[in-house]
Amino acid sequence: MTRGERQTPMNRHLNIGAGVPLLLAIVVAGCSSILDVKPTNEIASGRAIVDGPSARAALHGAYDALQSLSYYGEDFVIYGDLSADNVSHTGTYSTYADAGANRLKSTHGDIALMWEVIYDGINRTNEILAKVPPVPLLSDTERAQILGEAHFLRALHYHNLVKLWGDVPIVTEPVTNIGEASKIERASTAAVYDQINDDLAQAEQLITDESNTRQGTVGAVKALQARVRLYQRDWQGAERAADSVAAMGYTLAPEYANLFTANGSDTPEDIFRVIFTAEDATYLGYLYLAKGSPWGGRREIAPLPSLIDSYEAGDARKAWSISYDGSDRAFGSKYPTSLGAEHPHVIRFAEVILIRAEALARQGKLEDAVEEYNKLRVRAKISPHVYGTNVTTQDEVIDAILQERRVELAFEGDRWPDLNRNGLTVATLGLPADRAYQVLYPIPQRERDVSSLSQNPGY
């Protein structure tokens, strides 16, 4: 079964660019005379952003882009574990089989859709940043908040792109004609990070909200800064950003299970989450949960033995995340509903703790790093590590942190980027030399057919 065969109208939030190349998508998005956008909380670009209500609706539409099945509703999250060593393909989707075997091609449908929905999200933010500044009847505070959230979302989108594809096009203005769009080229990874950091700096200056965990806030900006600095190997910057998040008063949820309830219940660990409802449902649980289980599901993917065995005895994270069906087959149970109203985390305080721990360890502050990641071990009800006994060298501490990231963030899409940023993918997965290029995803061929975009080596 292909990706196209399993699409349904139920959660098709992508109204700009679904199934068409980026270049056509962004041109269509810029031509309000031919754009028909549904549902009503998503608005046409250009002429639509004219006052306070339409500016607010545009921002809602920018967040709605995250709900796509090709983004946080399903594929973007799943592929972060499926391409790595956490999850195997056990069902019938041929696109998942190719990803699980690290045999992606430039014509891969899921990869193309993922690319397109992320750029659709970018275009929505570009429209806000271009059209909201002169809108009348908005207070200075609200105008700044809307613009700041658009910068935050654009930074998130670009970081998600650069993690998977490396060099990618930077588009910061609405594109309105095919000739202009066809000239877009890929920018270097360094240039993309410059854009990400510029957007985050703008967001930091503009955003004042500190409380809404389903939209961009001061804490969300700082947490994303910490993540970005970690990926850039700016250890001091990552530590400073993580410290600023901790100073805002975030704490771990008392129990790991509190983070993954059926209705997205709030926890003190929440920093930024994506809202889903029964009508606009996430498919994460549906793909992980066992067939015939009390929750429903199809077990299209399942945890690999190496992940299961990596949990220590008594780890509450394993007890919540991995279950067994009547045939004693393991399945992922982190997301407890099938087609559910859960609110998956884009970033939570546990990740910030792990970022800080790694940043400390990379700088040689080993005892402090161990103390930091032990917070998660205590929450998971396993014994904290003793520096000098359980771990002694810098390499041992860093390995322990990467292991904590694996079990803490399992099924949240972080394993593949973690392996790649540490240069561990080829060795960990045992990729042969002739497929080592798969560490970067292919630029979709249908994008290259209408543009001058270069391809990643090997494809």
Image (cartoon, rainbow, N blue to C red):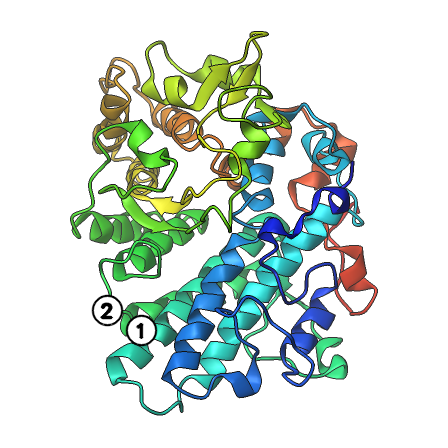
What residue is drawn where x is 39% and y is 89%?
135
Q: Position of residue 303 (x, y in %)?
A: 55, 22
Asked if 455 appears above or below 257 in the picture, the reply is below
Q: Which residue sits at x=27%, y=56%?
A: 219
Q: Look at 61% across and 59% down and name the residue there.
A: 117
Distance from the alpha carbon under mark 2 to that under mark 1: 7 Å
Query: Which residue is the site of mark 1?
Result: 145
> In the displayed structure, would residue 442 be above or below residue 319?
below
| Res 35 → quadrant | bottom right
Question: Residue 380, how many percent across, how many down?
Answer: 28, 22
Q: Is residue 101 visible?
A: yes
Crowd tier of the residue under label 2, counting other residues whose Cα lies within 10 Å: few below 14, some 14–19, many 20 or above: some
Residue 222 percent coordinates (x, y): 30, 57
The N terminus: image quadrant: top right
Disc 2 to disc 1: CB gap under 8 Å: yes
Numbered mark located on residue 208 in the image: 2
